[in-house]
Image (tube, rainbow, N blue to C red):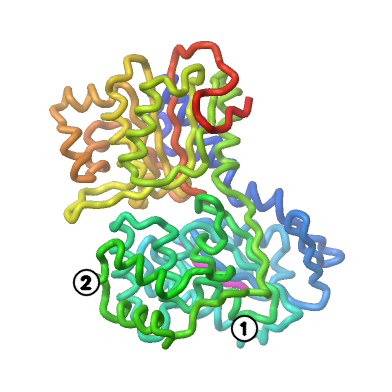
Amino acid sequence: MIIKNMQELATTELRKDVLSLIEAGVERVLPSTIMKSVVKYDLTGRILTVGDYAYPLSRGRVFVIGGGKAAGIMAETLERIVTPANITAGIVACKSSDYKTSKITVVEAGHPVPDQRGLDGVNKMLALRERYSINGNDLVICLISGGSSALMPCPVDGVRLEDKQGITRLLLGSGASIHEINVVRKHLSKTKGGGLGHSYSPAAVVSLILSDVIGNDLDVIASGQTCPDPSTFSDAYRVLEEYDLLSRAPKGIIDFLARGCQGQVEETPKSTGNCINHIMGDNTLALQAMFQKAKELGLGPYIVTAGQKGDTATMARLRAAEILSHKYTGYDVVLIGGETTSVLPKVAGKGGRNQHYAAVSMLAMKRHTGEWVSASIGTDGSDFLPDVAGAIVDSGSLARAKARGIDVESYVRQYDSNTLLNRIGESLIVTGNTGTNVGDLIVYAFRNMVELPETPSSSGMALR
């Protein structure tokens, strides 16, 4: 069971249904499930197949690199498919090193703020080329999943790791989108923006990717470590300017980006001809699995979008307003995927975007007269805090808070959702490290809905 505190949270049938949908969604995007269906290896002919693409390995060796929250399980699964005997060496960076691999070393590193362990891991990956004289006959398999931008730091010369840690913290709390954050990251790194893949040329680099990015933009996932970078130093500088970070960012970073804008520093790679990228899965797979599970439970599901983004509180209020205005009349389950962004006050409490989404939803849904449940989780099992995946609230949560004298609005204003939901109880979802990461999943469920129409009055996927 993925949700470790299921019994504590499943206090009503509707809550149990919602939690079952989340379980189905996360299970569908576990790396072991996805990779076994996409990646094959012919031991006799030594041919690696990824989907419809075949890579003969009769002349060369296989090396494995990469990182991300799912990299550990991806490495375990790859070894089972290819077998350790057919892998020369490998190193991947993950949030935990507790994985059983023979040839691929799993390095534990910091997330969401990069640390020295991650830097040491990347340096070991880069050292593989010289150590084994990797050449054009060899194949480098790169395992990429969400989180690798932080887990695989490699600052450019002149920028300290401490500076990258500082700018990462500032960007995460600024309200900048993941696209914007990664533009800055790419121009402060030797390996992001295509640098990692380019460094192994002329060897072919085949990336197996689990996407946590809306739209599956290859240059954004993991900061595009094996993908050409269309952005420029000027773009990176403008991000800091737009979010009023120029005066707060480390001086070394501002100086480096300014030099890049003046053409004094070489741009990130604009072509990576030796790299081939395969997206194996994203949150669409999770939503489809949740849809099917809802049908099995006798519910009427509707997928709104796999690409929700924007301010966390704004989107929670918008979805509540849609529900209250009967936009999804005829459906009793609404499914959403994506990743919102929170703009934190200077003094913020404890929590994450999924907990904040649930807390705001509790207030936004208070005018709903029937029974309802809403849950929001990060598929990696960590909603900024490592021990909380997200939260579930229902039509009785606000009443329980008021009965205990809890000022919900005050906690929401202070972005202190974790403290709030802890006090209310039966709210925080605990999964532990799931070993995957395809963004966030959000569920709304209702009782006593009317007969299903052909389509609701919004764009989306009814998938009947």
User: Could you tell whether 212 is left or right of 140 in the image?
Assistant: left
Q: Residue at x 60, y 78 (%)?
A: 198
User: Counting residues from the N terminus, which is met first, the one under dot 2 or under dot 1?
Assistant: 1
- Residue lying at the far left in this picture: please name it: 405
Binning the other alpha carbons within 10 Å of mark 2 as few (below 14), some (14 to 19) or many (20 upward) gives few
- When asked about the image quadrant of residue 208, the answer is bottom right
Q: Point out the stretch of residues depicted in magenta.
A: 90-94
Residue type at numbered disc 1: Arg
Vertical position of residue 432 compared to residue 119: above or below: above
Circle on res. 129: 1
Residue where numbered disc 2 is placed = 247
User: Could you tell whether 260 is left or right of 284 in the image?
Assistant: left
Q: Residue at x 61, y 74 (%)?
A: 271
Vertical position of residue 412 compared to residue 163: above or below: above
**Disc 2 from disc 1: Cα separation:** 40 Å
Q: Residue at x 38, y 46 (%)?
A: 310
The x, y position of residue 68, in whole percent, is 50, 61
Q: Residue at x 29, y 29 (%)?
A: 364
Evaluate if marks 2 and 1 touch, with contact meaning CB atoms under 8 Å apart: no
- When asked about the image quadrant of residue 403, the answer is top left
Secondary structure mainly formed by the magenta segment: strand
Q: Which quarter of the rendered picture does the C terminus lie within?
A: top right
Vertical position of residue 167 compared to residue 318: above or below: below
Which of the pair 445/400 is nearer the observer?
Answer: 445
Closer to the camera: disc 2 or disc 1?
A: 2
